[in-house]
Amino acid sequence: MKYYVYILYSESLDVYYKGFSTDVEKRLEYHLNSQHKFTSKTKDWVIVNVQEFEEKQEALQEENRLKKLNRKSIGKLIG
């Protein structure tokens, strides 16, 4: 099984959201359909970065690392 760490961006909120999933497209639909407290504030989320991992623990560690990054560091990461 593959594991993914993703970054979503909302232009209307001008904010990034970082998460973990085994199916990024399905997870995006979850966020767009207002099924998550934070992301339910808007429906313009787009995927701006995805990283693939073989091991769940590695993906979770990367998600935690991303959540600690500031906006400038995230901007460098996504280009």
Image (tube, rainbow, N blue to C red):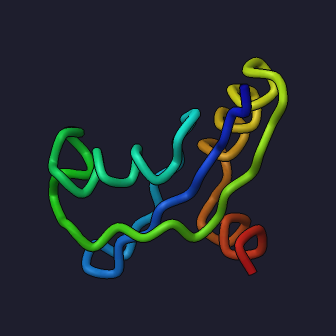
Residue 63 placement: quadrant:
top right
Q: Quadrant of the C terminus?
A: bottom right
Q: Height in image: 40 above or below 1?
A: below
Measured as percent of width and height from the top left, residue 61 is found at 75, 27
Instruction: Please state if 27 lies on the left or on the right of 2 as rendered.
Output: left
Q: Nearer the viewer, residue 63 or 31?
A: 31
Q: Residue at x 37, y 76 (%)?
A: 14
Total labels: the figure holds 0
Q: Quadrant of the N terminus?
A: top right
Q: Residue at x 77, y 68 (%)?
A: 77
Q: Residue at x 67, y 65 (%)?
A: 74
Measured as percent of width and height from the top left, residue 4 is found at 66, 41
Q: Height in image: 46 above or below 67?
A: below
Residue 68 placement: quadrant:
top right
Measured as percent of width and height from the top left, residue 55 is found at 82, 23
Q: Residue at x 28, y 45 (%)?
A: 30
